Amino acid sequence: MPLDQTALLIELEPVVATNLDRHLSLAKEWFPHEFVPWSEGRTFDGVLGGEAWRPEDSKLPEVAKTALIVNLLTEDNLPSYHHEIASLFGRDGAWGTWVHRWTAEEGRHGIAIRDYLTVTRGVDPVELERARMEHMQSGYVNVNGHEMLHSIAYVALQELATRISHRNTGKATGDPVAEQMLARVAADENLHMMFYRNILTAAFELAPDQAMRAVANVTANFQMPGANIEGFGRKAVLIALAGIYDLRQHRDEVLQPVLRQWNVWDRTDLRDDGERARDELSARMTELETQAARFEERRAARTKRH
Ligand SMILES: [Fe+2]
Ligand SMILES: [Fe+2]
């Protein structure tokens, strides 16, 4: 008999409690304001009559601007994510404590990135604010919203993807200050990944077929949380061409290590649908390998031409 959502929440609660304690013991307090070079700032035009932003104010490479905007808009959409996970996990007990703690930590990320971009005049602040309004007004709906194991598998992968994206965006800025700030954010994302990954590890022990089904489905249709940002497709291509986040990293640095941690390939406790899900997952990994290799070839050919 598959476990229903309530049973899963109850059964996994002790694991959530243990991992919450673990998280709190590992997470170091940090302050966004310490990562921002405030003395570089100048008053803007408008209300206070300072200087308007000009493109030449920004010292950032184009692709770093694109990646920073995508990453920041993604962090900005936190109220929608909070709503999704609070609805799914509830606000009671260890689940609820985690939901609020996670939300507070994610809030720090948007603060740090926005302050950095505003003070250094890294991107057009008017355009950025309009993009934030537009993005947040479209909200975020978790496609796995009805099913908690799907959602946990998704966030485990997504936190790792975000970690890699922040890290590589930092490198792409060419600015040690930005790199340091984004490395700090990435360290948080890594702890978030570990939390969700460990919950799903426990779910595999509890309900292996359901967990495997969740992982297969999520891997089949994985999309970054910012996928509904205006012009995301074009931005994602630029980000991938720059090696900030591409299919190769998605397959080899996000999916592979997490799937290995869940021991998906060597499990002996799967039955009908679990086995079917693992076959689908295996086929998906092969398909991703082909797609990643094809993308790398195209990118190499493009670099040669330029
Ligand atoms: Fe974040
Ligand atoms: Fe995170």
Image (cartoon, rainbow, N blue to C red):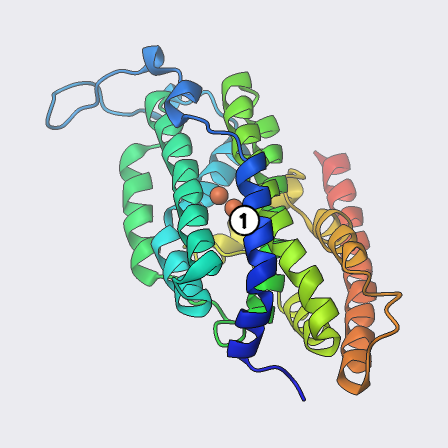
Q: Local crowd at mark 1 within 10 Å, few (<14), some, or many (≥20)?
A: some
> Circle 1 — which element?
helix
In the shown orientation, is residue 73 left or right of residue 281?
A: left
Residue at screen point 32% across, 55% down: 136
Q: Nearer the viewer, residue 67 or 202?
A: 202
Quarter of the picture containing the C terminus is top right
Circle 1 sits on which residue? 20
Q: Could you tell me residue 265's position as x and y percent? A: 86, 65
Q: How many marks?
A: 1
Q: Nearer the viewer, residue 139 or 17?
A: 17
The quarter of the picture where residue 11 lies is: bottom right
Q: Is residue 74 visible?
A: no
In the shown orientation, is residue 261 left or right of residue 234?
A: right
The quarter of the picture where residue 138 lies is: bottom left
Q: Could you tell me residue 174's position as x and y percent? A: 57, 21
In the shown orientation, is residue 247 left or right of residue 84?
A: right
Quarter of the picture containing the N terminus is bottom right
Residue at screen point 53% across, 19% down: 175
Q: Could you tell me residue 132's position as x and y percent? A: 32, 47
Q: Could you tell me residue 25's position as x and y percent? A: 56, 36
Give the vertical position of 138 relative to 297 (above or below): below
Give the vertical position of 126 relative to 222 (above or below): above
Q: Is residue 160 visible?
A: yes
Residue type at mark 1: give it.
Leu
Residue at screen point 41% across, 64% down: 84
Q: Nearer the viewer, residue 81 or 220?
A: 81
Give the vertical position of 230 relative to 176 (above or below): below
Residue at screen point 28% across, 25% down: 53
Residue, far bottom: 1
